[in-house]
């Protein structure tokens, strides 16, 4: 479960935060002599850039969701394999006992299609346990240790797939939280850098002041970037 406190401080994609940070870092490098007057030295700028690079290497949510979906598909496949093995046993049990008898009901396979993962695991184990208790009566319909081993192995495989799938869900939650926290740290540093840049050029150069302005949305950011590019093209 994600922490409620891990909220993004910025309203645009992580990739745009990364690009925006690189743009502002490049500008700060050009104005580094001015930044030093605020105690913002080259080392801090270099550290900021390194954090940006590390942030860009984090797996995206699409990657994590993809891994999670693959494990979910494998879980569904393992579940069907287990259900098939259980049905194979129950087909034989039905040949021996009436499906309305207590002996049949004892296997607890009713509404198997509606069972949760945990219920299906317990069902598989119960089928093997109950069948072994009645093995002397069920041998004539072909139930033996080989048939029961198929259920046991399928049950173990399904349980492993459930655990792996849950691990992927947890890993995604942790990765999302980590990405939000790191992104927020970059954003906080970006604000510091931009505030210094604006203060440097507030009454000296309007264009260079605007270069340090942050926008609250991705659309506003793109418009500002296009405006800067158009101005630079006119100058050249």
Image: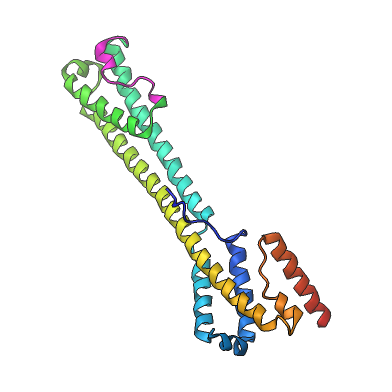
Say if the magenta span includes residue 110. Answer: yes
Taking 207 as reference, is 223 above or below it? above
Image position of 19 (left or right of 4):
right
Q: Position of residue 206 (x, y in %)?
A: 76, 79
Image quarter where the C terminus lies is bottom right
Is residue 102 rendered magenta in the image? yes
Name the outermost residue toward the bottom: 33
Along the viewing direction, whichever of 8 and 230 lies nearer the viewer: 8
At x 57%, y 74%, the residue is 192
In the rendered view, does 166 fall on the left or right side of 129? right
User: Taking 174 as reference, is 185 above or below it?
Assistant: below
Q: Could you tell me residue 56's position as x and y percent?
A: 53, 67
Position of residue 175 measured from the top left corner of the image (x, y, whole percent): 45, 57
The foreground one among 236 and 67 is 236
Foreground: 55 or 67? 55
Q: Residue at x 62, y 64 (%)?
A: 16
Q: Is residue 144 above or below residue 8?
A: above
Quadrant location of residue 104?
Answer: top left
**Where, by quadrant of the figure, is residue 86 drawn?**
top left
**In the orientation shown, which residue stands out farthest toward the front?**
203
**Magenta region, residue range:** 100-113
Image position, residue 24 (x, y; %): 63, 76
Report the number of discs. Answer: 0
**What kind of colouring is applied to the model shown?**
rainbow
Task: Give the residue displayed 33% in from the left and 28% down from the top.
Answer: 85
């Amino acid at each position: 479960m994600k922490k409620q406190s891990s909220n993004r401080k910025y309203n645009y994609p992580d990739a745009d935060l990364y690009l925006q940070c690189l743009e502002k870092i490049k500008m700060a490098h050009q104005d580094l002599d001015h930044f030093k007057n605020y105690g913002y030295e080259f080392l801090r700028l270099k550290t900021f850039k390194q954090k940006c690079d590390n942030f860009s290497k984090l797996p995206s949510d699409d990657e994590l969701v993809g891994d999670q979906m693959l494990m979910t598909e494998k879980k569904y496949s393992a579940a069907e394999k287990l259900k098939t093995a259980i049905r194979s046993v129950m087909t034989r049990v039905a040949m021996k006992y009436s499906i309305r008898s207590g002996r049949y009901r004892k296997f607890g396979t009713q509404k198997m299609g509606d069972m949760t993962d945990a219920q299906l695991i317990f069902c598989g184990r119960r089928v093997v346990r109950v069948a072994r208790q009645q093995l002397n009566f069920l041998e004539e319909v072909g139930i033996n240790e080989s048939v029961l081993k198929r259920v046991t192995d399928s049950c173990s495989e399904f349980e492993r797939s459930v655990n792996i799938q849950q691990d992927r869900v947890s890993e995604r939650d942790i990765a999302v939280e980590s990405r939000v926290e790191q992104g927020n740290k970059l954003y906080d540093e970006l604000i510091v850098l931009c505030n210094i840049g604006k203060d440097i050029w507030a009454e000296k150069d309007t264009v260079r002041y605007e270069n340090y302005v942050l926008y609250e949305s991705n659309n506003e950011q793109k418009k500002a970037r296009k405006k800067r590019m158009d101005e630079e093209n006119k100058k050249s």
